[in-house]
Amino acid sequence: MDSNRIIDLFLFTLPALITGMIAYYFFKTHTANEDGRRRFLLKKDLQTTSLPLRLQAYERLTLFLERISPNKLLLRVKPTSSNKDDYEALLIQNIQQEMEHNLTQQIYVSEKCWSVISTAKSATVQLIRKANLSEKTDSADKLREVILTEMMERHSPSDAAISILKEEVRELW
């Protein structure tokens, strides 16, 4: 009789164990789904707030790159004297001020993108310095001419950075 009683106890316990395991699995899955739903809703709310800020950062960085493009920079910043070194310093100072004005935008873009923007800025400064060291350059007006001639032969460093910015904005959608 003891063995029958053990078998009966086992037969009563087995459905309870199966029901318990199914309930555990159901609640575990349900909890995971609820956590995922909450994360999705939170991310959705954050995205509606942060997306306009990120787009504004991309716009400002594009404007920065356009403003430091040598062709546009030379049109906007006129020489104050005929001294080529003074004009070089004025151009580089203008680029540095533009960069400082947009430094905070780096938190909204990827590390790769910010690196490309910094490289474009440095390449533009190097281009101006190289043009100033040229033997053809003897005045501020000649410096402008040498830089513009250089820009006719190749693309501005800003152009590559702008294309990276555009690519990153496309990835936001």
Image (tube, rainbow, N blue to C red):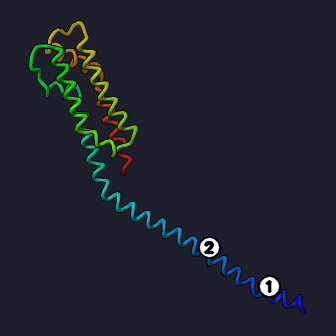
Residue 72: name its quadrant: top left
Amino acid residing under circle 2: Tyr
Farthest bottom residue?
Answer: 1
Residue 169: name its quadrant: top left
Amino acid residing under circle 1: Phe
Residue 87: name its quadrant: top left
Which residue does the image show at 21% across and 32% down from the upper left? 97
Question: What residue sits right under mark 2 in the picture?
Answer: 25
State which quarter of the image contains the N terminus.
bottom right
Which residue does the image show at 23% across and 14% down from the upper left? 132
| Mark 2 neighbour class, 10 Å CA radius: few under 14, some 14 to 19, many 20 or more | few
Q: Secondary structure at mark 2?
A: helix
Of the numbered discs 1 and 2, the one sitting upstream in the chain is 1
Looking at the image, is 80 positioned above or below residue 103? above
Q: Is residue 155 left or right of residue 112?
A: left
Looking at the image, is 76 positioned above or below residue 147? below
Q: Position of residue 26 (x, y in %)?
A: 59, 75
Looking at the image, is 22 positioned above or below residue 77? below
Q: CA distance from mark 1 to mark 2?
A: 22 Å
Q: Position of residue 162 (x, y in %)?
A: 30, 36
Q: Position of residue 149 (x, y in %)?
A: 22, 16
Q: Secondary structure at mark 1?
A: helix
Could you say which is closer to the camera, residue 98 or residue 29?
98
Dots 1 and 2: beta carbons under 8 Å? no
Q: Position of residue 30 (x, y in %)?
A: 54, 73
| Mark 1 neighbour class, 10 Å CA radius: few under 14, some 14 to 19, many 20 or more | few
Which residue does the image show at 13% across and 13% down from the upper left? 83
Question: What residue sits right under mark 1 in the picture?
Answer: 10
Which residue does the image show at 14% across and 15% down from the upper left? 140
Farthest top residue?
Answer: 135
Looking at the image, is 136 positioned above or below residue 92? above
Query: What is the number of callouts on the image?
Result: 2
